[in-house]
Image (cartoon, grey):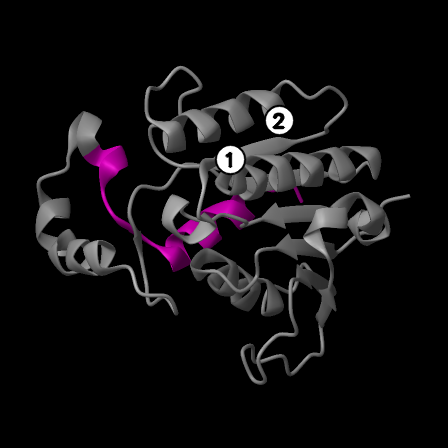
Amino acid sequence: MTINKTALVLGATGLVGKALVKQLLVDPRYDAITCVVRRPLPAKLFNDPLHKLNPIVIDFEKLQEYHGYFNVRHVYCCLGTTLKTAGSKEAFRKVDFEYVHIAAQLCRNSQCEGFVWISCVGADAASSNFYLRVKGELENAILRMTQLKHAAAVRPSLLLGKRHESRPMEQVAQYMAPIVGMFMVGPFAKYRPVSAVEVAHKMISLQHF
C-alpha cells in the first residue's frame, strides 16, 4: 500500500540530488523525505527545521534488499557518475544503468505513483558514444517496463553548479555557459547549460500529485 505525501531520493549528495532534497524539504505536499545514501550525510548539509528528512545508509550492491524503503508515493533517482570517476565502462554501467533500473523495478513492485530519473540530452541506445548509449538503453528499459505507473526522465545538457569533485573541463565550460547559451536557440535550445536547481524543479514538476 503506497503511503501518500512521502518521497524517496537516490543520489541525494550529487549536484542535482542536493538541490532536489532542498526543494522537497520545503514543499508542503511532502511530509517525509527518505534519502538512501552510501555513507552518512555530512552534518548540516540540509536545513531541515520540519524534521522531514530520514537519511538511510545502504549497500547499493544489495539494493534489492531495501525494497521496504520504496513504499512511498514518489521516487526520485539522481544517481550518476562519470567514466573517469567509475574507472571502467563496467563500473559506469553498474551505477548509471543497473542501479537506476533496479530502483525503477522496486518502484514498480511497490506500486509507487511516480518514478523520475536523470538522463541526458542526446541519450540514444543506437549512439556510438558509450555514455549516450547507456543512457538511451536505460530510457528504453524503463519506459518499456510494464505496470510502472508513471515514469519520466529529465534530459539536461551541461549542469551548472558547484561540485565537490574537480572536473576541470566542466569548470571551464561553466564559465563560458552564459555566453554560449545566448546562441543556443531553436533546435539547439535543448543543449543550453542548465542549473541543478532548474533540473530539480523540473523533476518535481513531472510527478503526478
**Residue type for callout 1:** Ala
**Residue type for callout 2:** Ile
Q: Hey, which quadrant is residue 171 in on the image?
A: bottom left
Label 2 Cα crowd, 10 Å radius (few <14 / some 14-19 / many 20+): many
Q: Find out whether residue 197 is within the magenta segment.
A: yes
Q: Quadrant of the N terminus?
A: top right
Q: Quadrant of the C terminus?
A: top right
Is residue 73 in view from this perspective? no
Which stretch appears magenta? 189-209
Residue 151 % position (x, y)? 62, 32
Q: Which residue is mark 2?
A: 142
Q: Hey, which quadrant is residue 120 in on the image?
A: top left
Proximity of marks 2 and 1: CB atoms separated by less than 8 Å: yes
Decide if residue 166 is on the left or right side of residue 144: left
Provide the secondary structure element on which disc 1 rests: strand
Residue 92 % position (x, y)? 49, 41
Label 1 Cα crowd, 10 Å radius (few <14 / some 14-19 / many 20+): some
Above or below — where is 71 with respect to 40? above
Residue 153: give its label. Answer: 1
